[in-house]
Amino acid sequence: MTQLKEARKGRITDEIKEVARQEFINPKQLRKLIAKGRVVLPRNVNHAFSPIGIGKFLRTKVNANIGSSPNSHKIDDELKKLEICTKYKADTVMDLSTGGDIDKIRRAILKNSSIPVGTVPIYQAMVEKESIEDVTEDDILNAIEKHIRDGVDFITVHSGLTKNAIPLVEKRLMGAVSRGGSFLVRWMKHNDKENPLYDNFKRILELAGEYDVTLSLGDGLRPGAIKDSTDKAQLHELKVLGKLAKNAWKNKVQAMIEGPGHIPLHEIEKNMKLQQKYCHKAPFYVLGPLVTDVAPGYDHITSAIGGAIASWHGADFLCYVTAAEHLRLPNADEVREGIIAARIAAHAGDIAKGIKKAAEWDNELSKNRKNFDWKNQFELAMDPEKAERMRKESCLNNEEYCTMCGKFCSMRK
Amino acid sequence: MTQLKEARKGRITDEIKEVARQEFINPKQLRKLIAKGRVVLPRNVNHAFSPIGIGKFLRTKVNANIGSSPNSHKIDDELKKLEICTKYKADTVMDLSTGGDIDKIRRAILKNSSIPVGTVPIYQAMVEKESIEDVTEDDILNAIEKHIRDGVDFITVHSGLTKNAIPLVEKRLMGAVSRGGSFLVRWMKHNDKENPLYDNFKRILELAGEYDVTLSLGDGLRPGAIKDSTDKAQLHELKVLGKLAKNAWKNKVQAMIEGPGHIPLHEIEKNMKLQQKYCHKAPFYVLGPLVTDVAPGYDHITSAIGGAIASWHGADFLCYVTAAEHLRLPNADEVREGIIAARIAAHAGDIAKGIKKAAEWDNELSKNRKNFDWKNQFELAMDPEKAERMRKESCLNNEEYCTMCGKFCSMRK
């Protein structure tokens, strides 16, 4: 059973009812959107939590990446990161662990998570071998199978990066900057074989279908510099991803498409339109986009700018980018700020694209701001704790107005 | 003598030559832009520093607000803030002091600033009286005259907020949220008189013309909630500002227009187009725009999103907004992050609108990123210190790659 199969049969499942309720949308309309592949409900049949929807006419969702590295791989640390993600209302998390006991960490996260969990199984296949060249097709398929059977709700598979795209990559300023993409390019060149995630797509579909795992069709060739944006390599892969999405739907497997990356402001709308065209309106899951390359240390901001415009023009799901991007793994503060920055982008996009009740939130907060109801204003704020703490640091704490304008506050009666 | 007067006479002044050099633009083209009022060179004849230009075909500029408050008014603190602004490359500062010896602070800032300094003279007129109702027309004009004679390079005058706009303000969710605007609304109602900044515009032009002070025609009615965005009150004032700009040009006084405020994503382009139409392509100086009301504590991000789109569609000058907006005065860290966020927005907009050599910066940084030349990458970064510090915190400091991907770095040879 998959949600897509049920929706195709005309059945309104409990999950569809629940998501329709969250999103203020008619369950019949939602069923149709799922049947057409325009909305996914990522939830493994072995993973229990309140379902969420990602796709057209729904609130734009935010993913936060967590996971161990070779230098830091305590399970408790990862569970703490998961707590931060839930506290600051990321809609999903991805466990990108590459260090320590990866299976144990993934299972602990799955057990403790109340939101959908995604993974990139090839990462595990890569790190468990001495060198990338030693990874076999079986290693990759086994990792996918293990993650799916463990209860992961969505997995990234870079199945669209085919061998004939490699010459296009070599023309780039930055080449392939995604970990999965650069691994596959190297693997294909070394083995002189087609991408195993493309060649074995049928097997991947069987596994995903069995557990209702949503495939997140990864963009191994997302541009890593604005110079490489919207180039032939990127668009070649996007077209293949569109074909694979159709193939997934034929097999009643839920699918979404991953997207860029570094994209200048004026190319974002075009990118969203091309994805809709090539990928038949499958949900679009973007990383950023980062609208400039020049701000390492502030890439949560470069991404929030791009993410807002992407969401407005059709992206359904934003992967957060933290201030540490390009520099190191993020710390707890950076994870929090990264989630909030992505949520701001998602919400700004939702207001612009007219998602139901999105702007009501703003109006409600502004009414409380106008009335100096600080308590309610904080409760409604995207990050209530930070807003309250900052206000408390002000010495006019007992006054209605704040230190910005003092008694010249424009809102005083 | 004003730059506008000289440009109209066909003279290419030293200032025009210098700005043309900075901006990779032909001096003749720049002279024409200044003559038409599409570019301003804000510099008081009594204030010596290397001139900058603000307007069409030039790099989008960023302003940072500093200034004392009744609770904190040490001159040294303000000079330290000025240092931060210069260090992080704000293009201008505005001294919005409302506490302590305001004259002394302004003069100290002017003496020490290597970038244009702006002020809002009515703030001083307001704070030096017991109550707003006691402020006289003379108080306001005297404050303007004093600031101009002291050497201020640009002043905000909210001359476009006329009495007939008051009923439009009263329909709003948030009313008039700018300090100047709310003061003037109260003053006009109390005195049952027209806005003195409108009534005495001729006198203001005489003073500004004498010292070549650029008038920043203030938007007292900028929307303070997305609900109030692009409403009749805002557009009424904008039309008046356009007429005043024409009047300024007739008198050879340089002028720019101030703009919003809280504006949802999908209304920003329209706002930029309306300003160009109503204000005859006078340079546009915007505060934000903030694309949502719900993120107190993160308004540098909500503003960077709006500022980037504004810059792309025609804004020439962005006023920074810090994370402390709506909560308290910003601290040093928040000032720094606010400047960088606004610079990111300005630069992203510059790439999108095709400002000369804007994207070259990105390409240069990305080349160094590709080559693992961390030193050059940091030097080119928008905030070199932060980028370098974050990387140093990584335990892989001596390795080429960083803790994000470790040995699985996609860029390793």
Image (cartoon, coloured by chain):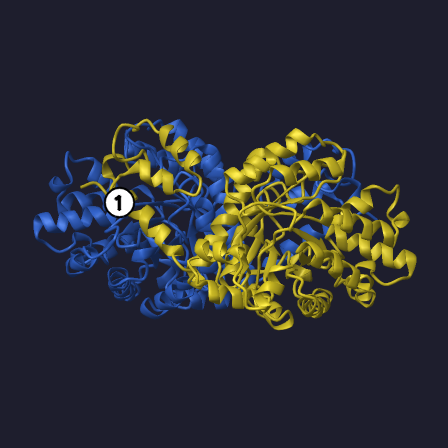
Chain colours: A blue, B yellow
- The answer to whether residue A14 is visible is no
Residue A222 position within the rendered picture, expressed as x and y whole percent measured from the top left: 30, 54
Left or right, B365 with reference to A298:
left
* Residue located at (16% from left, 36% from top): A129
* Residue located at (31% from left, 41% from top): A150
- The part of the image, by quadrant, that contains residue B192 is bottom right
Residue found farthest to the bottom: B277
Residue B402 position within the rendered picture, expressed as x and y whole percent measured from the top left: 30, 35
* Residue located at (82% from left, 61% from top): B195
- The part of the image, by quadrant, that contains residue B112 is top right
Above or below residue A100? Residue B192 is: below
Left or right, B385 with reference to A391:
left
User: Between A45 and B38, which is closer to the camera in this rendering?
Assistant: B38
Image quarter in which the C terminus of chain B is found: top left
Q: Secondary structure at mark 1?
A: helix
* Residue located at (49% from left, 68% from top): A29
Residue A38 position within the rendered picture, expressed as x and y whole percent measured from the top left: 40, 65
Left or right, A380 with reference to B144:
left
Residue B406 position within the rendered picture, expressed as x and y whole percent measured from the top left: 27, 34
Question: Which chain is disc 1 placed on?
Answer: B
- The answer to whether residue A140 is visible is yes
Left or right, B235 with reference to A42:
right
Image quarter in which the N terminus of chain B is found: bottom right
User: Between B117 and A250, which is closer to the camera in this rendering?
Assistant: B117
Please rate how many residues cluster around mark 1, counting C-alpha atoms within 10 Å: few if below 14, some from 14 to 19, many from 20. many
Residue holding disc 1: B370
User: Between A287 and A230, which is closer to the camera in this rendering?
Assistant: A230
Above or below residue A292? Residue A243 is: below
Above or below residue B258? Residue B97 is: above
User: Between A182 and A43, which is closer to the camera in this rendering?
Assistant: A182
Above or below residue A27? Residue B378 is: above
Three-letter residue code for mark 1: Lys
